[in-house]
Image (cartoon, rainbow, N blue to C red):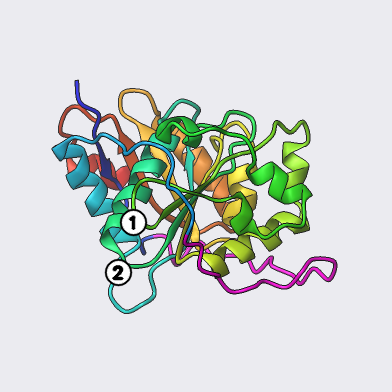
Amino acid sequence: MSRNFELLQRIGREQALYATAATEEPIPDLEPIRPIEPLPNITPVGSRLKIEAAELEEITKLVQRVFLLPGGESPHTVVFSGAESGNGCSWVCARVGEVLANQVTGSVCLVDANLRKPGLSEQFEVENHLGLTNALRDREPIRTFAKLLSCPRLWLVTSGSEADDAPTLLSSDRMRFRVAELRSQFDYVLIDTPAVSLFNDAAVLGASTDGLVMVLKANSSRRESARTAIQELRAAKVRVLGAVLNQRTFPIPQAIYEKL
């Protein structure tokens, strides 16, 4: 049974309802952001993702509708979150990152902000040693914690060392500074977060980015759960860019999509 998904909401439908909150503030005790320096001796790590033709087609549609809009106003820093746990958010985020990196000339960085149950390192089969939690505690540039993957122009910041204080770290001024630093160091930043129904991490991070893509699971996610998640994101002033139905194995009428 092949895994498949389809974009449920086109970008722009929620623009009148959701506005990105201006939460970034200067942090005087941190070093200023420095431009990217050439790193010629880095050896790529990890494995390339295996993807079927039907999956590639749908992921390509998602990438084009969210990141490659004409006019230069496309989002560049986007959070991915599931309405519920187990919706395959890390799987979707990883594959969107790889397809995007193959469609643009700029750099793409995946960030695993699911500090309680990280998944991006497993997707690419890389070690989760130093990563986001370490970057939030140390003063080294964010580039120090990014790994160049085997896919050209694709980087990964894993979740890093275990953190009992995950909510505090992700809502801190230092996290907002790191998001701003990621913006300056990479052309596109995709952040994987826990489900909206479990924690408020997606809402916290979504408010300081260009928006959020919600991942739903076919035959599992309920309409009421999706509505509740959207209401919570709306209350946090997070711009919802669209919703993805993961693991769809049968056609669903467009009329049903419109009701979500």
> For the magenta stretch, what is the residue range?
14-40
Q: Residue at x 28, y 29 (%)?
A: 247
Rounded to the nearest angstrom, the CA distance separating label 2 from label 1 is 15 Å
| Residue 53 shown left or right of residue 103 in the figure | left
Judged from this view, the residue extending furthest toward the top is 1
| Residue closest to the eye, 79 or 157 | 157
Query: Is residue 19 depicted above or below 96 in this figure?
Result: below
Residue 144 among those drawn in magenta: no
Secondary element type, mark 1 = helix
Name the chief secondary structure element in magenta.
loop
Judged from this view, the residue extending furthest toward the front is 41
Disc 2 marks which amino acid? Leu
The residue identified by callout 1 is: 101
Q: Residue at x 34, y 54 (%)?
A: 152
Residue 20 among those drawn in magenta: yes
Counting residues from the start of the chain, the first of labels 2 and 1 encountered is 2
The residue identified by callout 2 is: 69
| Residue closest to the eye, 159 or 246 | 159
| Residue closest to the eye, 172 or 200 | 172
